[in-house]
Image (spheres, grey):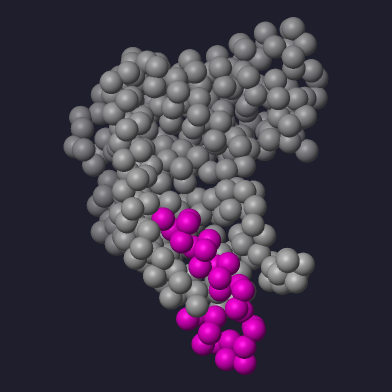
């Protein structure tokens, strides 16, 4: 047993929830962002501006989302070069065979293929053949076995959430908004989760609301400590920056969570806000305004006549309500001593 543990340690194979559920998942979201999401933005811009070349470039970027995710995962798992490069084929296979739930299949298959590739890396004189063969054969073979079932399961779960949200928009508006918002701030990827579940429609709108509540909420809540730099870095970047402070004082998270419980059902019941753009945008919030661009691209793709109420709802849910409501909860919690001076200061 000791010899096997030392071998795994030498090969940098660390079997842990953090390595696979946090590091790999977070990296996968970056791969998605650098391919599918950027491609969708370029496609939308090209369509609106009549720039065919932008549409074509967007199509190229979207086409390589599988390899981009797999290579990102390999990078997070510190794969050697031959393993990392071989994961391009693995990601393509898992994403293609996984269908709508492809990202979840890419995560499971790429992690397995990457670790197997690392085990054999540089163990033979013909490493240039053995390492790619083991990585690609294990990844592609596993994709043929499990990618389709994983994709079907993820799609079914996402459809169940969307069906429940349509059926009970108030209750599910709260549940989806709160949970996805929490995922956004935790060191895991809400964007990857939304994309893996194909979370769109009314449920996608609730997810956008929850993410905006966390990002804009923390930006405004911590303004007295972090000023304009904190406002921009959290409001247009990520609320994950507050994770260290949350660990020290979990109560600072309550204003943003409560805000998402308020804005979620307002989004679903009052404004009927839907995300019909790419599902990954549902979990991005105001990060680079990707959530808002996703909602807009859904309007355009559906040929919707965009009204003033649509724009007002998007602005209120994305910025104004999270700012005001979270600020109000923050005042209350500061008054009762749950949030103290310096609790929200970013290092």
Above or below 167: residue 51:
below
Q: Quadrant of residue 184?
A: top right
In the rendered image, the residue lying farthest to the front is: 1
Above or below 313: residue 104:
below
Q: Which residues are magenta?
A: 105-133
Q: Report the number of numbered marks.
A: 0
Quick check: can you spot residue 323?
Answer: no
Q: Nearer the viewer, residue 272 or 135?
A: 135
Q: Position of residue 316 (x, y in %)?
A: 43, 20
| Residue plotted at (43% across, 75% down) | 137
Quick check: can you spot residue 206?
Answer: yes
- Indicate yes or no whether the magenta region holds residue 118: yes
Q: Position of residue 75 (x, y in %)?
A: 59, 64
* 341 relative position to 21: left or right: right
Q: Main secondary structure of the magenta part?
A: helix
* 223 relative position to 292: left or right: right
């Amino acid at each position: 047993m000791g010899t096997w543990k030392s071998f795994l340690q030498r090969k940098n194979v660390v079997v842990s929830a953090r390595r696979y559920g946090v590091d790999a998942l977070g990296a996968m979201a970056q791969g998605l962002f650098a391919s599918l999401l950027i491609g969708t933005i370029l496609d939308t811009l090209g369509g609106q501006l009549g720039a065919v070349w932008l549409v074509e470039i967007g199509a190229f970027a979207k086409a390589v989302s599988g390899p981009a995710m797999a290579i990102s995962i390999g990078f997070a798992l510190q794969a050697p070069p031959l393993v990392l490069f071989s994961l391009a084929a693995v990601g393509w296979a898992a994403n293609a065979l996984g269908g709508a739930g492809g990202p979840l299949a890419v995560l499971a298959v790429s992690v397995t293929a990457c670790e197997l590739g690392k085990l054999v890396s540089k163990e033979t004189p013909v490493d240039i053949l053995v390492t790619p063969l083991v990585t690609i054969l294990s990844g592609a073979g596993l994709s043929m076995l499990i990618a389709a079932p994983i994709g079907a399961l993820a799609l079914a779960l996402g459809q169940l959430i969307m069906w429940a949200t349509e059926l009970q928009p108030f209750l599910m508006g709260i549940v989806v908004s709160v949970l996805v918002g929490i995922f956004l701030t935790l060191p895991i990827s809400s964007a990857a989760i939304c994309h893996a579940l194909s979370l769109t429609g009314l449920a996608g709108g609730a997810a956008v609301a929850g993410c905006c509540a966390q990002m804009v909420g923390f930006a405004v809540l911590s303004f007295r400590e972090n000023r304009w730099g904190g406002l921009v870095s959290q409001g247009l970047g990520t609320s994950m920056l507050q994770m260290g402070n949350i660990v020290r004082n979990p109560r600072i998270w309550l204003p943003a969570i409560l805000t998402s419980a308020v804005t979620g059902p307002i989004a679903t019941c009052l404004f009927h806000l839907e995300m019909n753009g790419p599902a990954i945008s549902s979990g991005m919030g105001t990060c680079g305004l990707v959530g808002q661009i996703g909602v807009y691209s859904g309007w355009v793709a559906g040929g919707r006549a965009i009204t003033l109420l649509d724009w007002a709802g998007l602005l209120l849910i994305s910025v104004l309500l999270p700012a005001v409501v979270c600020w109000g909860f923050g005042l209350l919690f500061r008054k009762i001593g749950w949030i103290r001076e310096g609790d929200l200061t970013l290092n």
